[in-house]
Each structure stands twice: as structure tokens, then as C-alpha cells.
Image (cartoon, grey):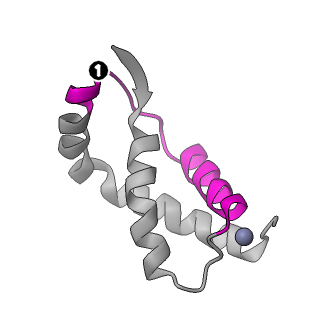
Amino acid sequence: MFLKNYMEIAVDKVLPNIIKAFSTICACDKCILDIKAIALNNLKPHYVVTDRGELYSKVDEMKVQFETDVMKALIDAIAIVSKNPRH
Ligand SMILES: [Zn+2]
């Protein structure tokens, strides 16, 4: 069993699609990590205790519930990083 912040998984799942949609943003490692950090700091953590197999079914259940919040946090983070890239 392990403890995992579901929001980290959700951000990893949603981010690639958003990057594709925002073709103008820089997708270097530094900017991606900055975007993730800012988005996760703005999202309320949602910890789950689970085993690996169960995690994926939980992720699907929670996806609908949190996807809008995650997308919004990522879009805000992209706006911040695009204005002040640190690369
Ligand atoms: Zn960059």
C-alpha cells in the first residue's frame, strides 16, 4: 500500500493535452516542472491510500470530479510561466 496525492496523477494526465492545445507555450523540462509546481500549489491535495492496481480505478472515478479544477489550475499556471519563463 502507498500514499499518493491524487492531484499529482491528475496533473500528469491532463498536462500533455493542455500543452498540445496551447501550441505557443514552451515545453522545456524547466517550464513543465514550473507549471506543475504552480498548479499543484493551487490545488487542494487529495491523498489516497491504495495499492497500485486499485489506484488506476480510483483515478478514473476521480477524474470526472476533479478534471475541471485541474485544467483551470494548469491554465493559470501556464499563463504565469509564459509571462516569466525561468529557462
Ligand atoms: Zn522553457
Task: Read off the magenta span.
Answer: 28-55
Quadrant of the rendering where the C terminus is positioned: bottom right
Q: Quadrant of residue 35?
A: bottom right
Front one among 60 and 30: 30
Q: Residue at x 32, y 50 (%)?
A: 66
Q: Residue at x 41, y 20 (%)?
A: 3
Residue ranking furthest to the bottom: 24
Q: In which of the image's four quarters is ligand 1 placed?
A: bottom right
Q: Residue at x 79, y 71 (%)?
A: 84
The yes-or-no answer for disc 1 within 8 Å of ligand 1 is: no
Q: Residues within 10 Å of mark 1 (few under 14, many from 20)?
A: some
At which x and y percent is residue 75? 51, 68
Total labels drawn = 1
Position above or below: 80 against 38: below
Position above or below: 40 against 22: above
In the image: residue 40, left or right of residue 20 = right
SS of the residue under disc 1: strand
Identify residue type, mark 1: Thr
At which x and y percent is residue 77? 60, 63
Residue ranking furthest to the top: 1
Q: Residue at x 68, y 68 (%)?
A: 80
At which x and y percent is residue 16? 44, 65
40 is within the stretch colored magenta: yes
Front one among 41 and 1: 1
Quadrant of the rendering where the N terminus is positioned: top left
What residue does disc 1 label? 50
20 is within the stretch colored magenta: no
At which x and y percent is residue 72? 45, 63
The main secondary structure of the magenta stretch is helix
